[in-house]
Amino acid sequence: MINIKNLCFSYSNKPPYALNNINLTIPDGVYLSIVGENGSCKTTLIKLILGILKPTLGSIEIDTNKIGYVPQRLDSFNSQFPITVKEVLSCHKNSLKDKNINILDILEIVNMNDYNNKLLGMLSGGQQQRVLIARALMGNPDIIILDEPSTGVDEINQKEIYSILRKLNKENNKTIISIEHNINIALENSTHILRIHKGEVKLFTVEEYKKLRDKNLDLDNVI
Amino acid sequence: MFQLDFMQNAFAAGLIISILCPFIGLFLVLRRYSMIGDTLSHSSFAGVAIGLVMGVNPILSAFLFTTLCAVVIEFLRGYYKKYAELVMSIVLTLSLGIAILLISSGKASAKVNSYLFGSILTVSSEDIKLILIVGIISLLTLIFLYNKLVYITFDEEGAKTSNINVKLINYIFTVLVGATISMSIRVMGLLVISSIMIVPVATAMQLKKGFKTTLIASIIFGMIDILLGLTLSYYIDSAPGGTIALTSVVTLFIVIIINKFLSNK
């Protein structure tokens, strides 16, 4: 479970806050999509949860330290960066306490076991994303956080990625938190939606969100 | 050639430099931090000038001053996250200012030219001992931190979430860059020291292999460039630094041409 209490954040450490007095509980086992317009601090919120950024005020309590992170497209995802799929996973494996992990088994979960010795930069966007998901799975995390997993990914690979995420959520009971730009993808795959607007947040189940949208309500005013 | 003491010393120093410089250089290139080589070579020059004026071993004073500048660079990087090149310019300006001030005062000896262009003749046994000690410590540190450095180079934010102390490792790495440069300045000369850090890496990247293979290839190309460059420099009586730099560029072009030929087949 993630408990966010009275969270305020600003990059300058003083008001006005980009995230303002957030109070939120994310229960175990949900598939949560975070949505909001550009610049609404979706990535900032997940960086606060991950501990990459520190809250200006308030606190974030997480009852597990087993969190896997899948970042957005990296600078190193270019065809000249000399790293293989196996090396990406090996350096993460070396950072874990439990090193008793078979890299090929992990790659099999994301259907990438044939690409072990391939250069990461020569793979498609979707394949690269699957490698990063495999990396996030290596510590057997309780929570997996993804930053826009569908960006730069073709439709076929998108379907594959979301199928893997849904399976991890439903069959392995992993909590999935994913930033989504496409609300339809969010509604199709998640159990809950977190909408961020003007520094405030509102948590919906997917059914609640769909009802509000079907009623043509101005969702900005629902928060 | 190898019966001469100074050539033995130069080759011994060259061998250590040829392993360390490309090792460091690979991480610098991939982190798009290549400018730090030039910046710290100027810091080394300021350190040499301080040593020559004060009458202490210039390689030791270069090492100490460069280490200080490396720490300053890493500290300032936190304030200019998106404009790292600004930090380099600040430290380069400081270092050049000190070097020019001291050298133009006439209190630094005439040996200063050998540090600009490199010199085979002036590598003493004492220099070799210092280069060996600093070289071995630097290499062992790099090997110990290898996996973490690869992680940070590939994905710095991901490394932070994996409980890697990225800030500390960045500081240690920058100090290692400074140590490598200050150690290499005697043979290579400050004007071209960054070439031996960068060009063998550029050559190795032509092979389009994984990280470990590219690292090993960078070191091998570094060895070829330095040892061949030193040999040529002896026979044609040229500045070793410049000769090594040109050899490294010729090696790069040869590999590019071979690559092109093989891919067209």
Image: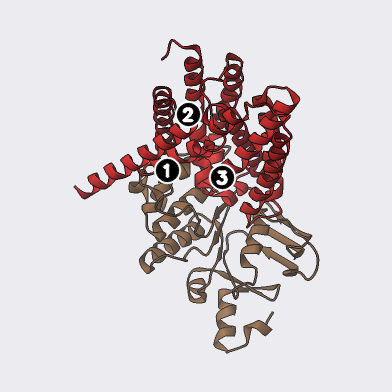
Chain colours: A brown, B red
Q: Earlier in the sequence, mark 3 or mark 2?
A: 3
Relative side of B126 to B242, left or right: right
Query: 10 Å neighbourhood of mark 1: few (<14), some, or many (≥20)?
Result: many
Q: Residue at x 53, y 29 (%)?
A: B118
Identify the mark nearer the N-term, 3 or 1. 3
Q: Residue at x 57, y 28 (%)?
A: B114
Find disc 1 in the rendering and name its residue: B202
Residue B174 location (% of width, % of height): 63, 39
- In the image shown, does B29 or B196 lie closer to the viewer? B196
Label 3: which residue? B152
Q: CA distance from mark 3 to mark 1?
A: 20 Å
Q: Chain of mark 1?
A: B
In the figure, residue A35 lies in which quadrant? bottom right
Of A163 and A115, the residue lying toward us = A115
Judged left or right of residue B247, residue A189 is: right
Of marks 1 and 2, which one's residue comes earlier in the chain? 1
Q: Residues within 10 Å of mark 2 (few under 14, many from 20)?
A: many
Of tags 3 and 1, the one toward the viewer is 1
Label 3–label 1 contact, CB within 8 A: no
Counting the numbered discs, the total is: 3
Question: What is the x, y in percent for residue A92?
Answer: 52, 43
Callout 3 amino acid = Ile
* SS state under label 3: helix
Alpha carbon separation for disc pair 1 and 2: 21 Å
Q: Nearer the viewer, mark 3 or mark 2?
A: 2
Q: CA gap, disc 3 to disc 2?
A: 34 Å
Q: Position of residue B103 (x, y in %)?
A: 69, 34
Residue A177 in the image: x percent, y percent?
A: 57, 62
Asked whether residue A1 appears in the rendered view, the answer is no
Which chain is disc 3 placed on?
A: B
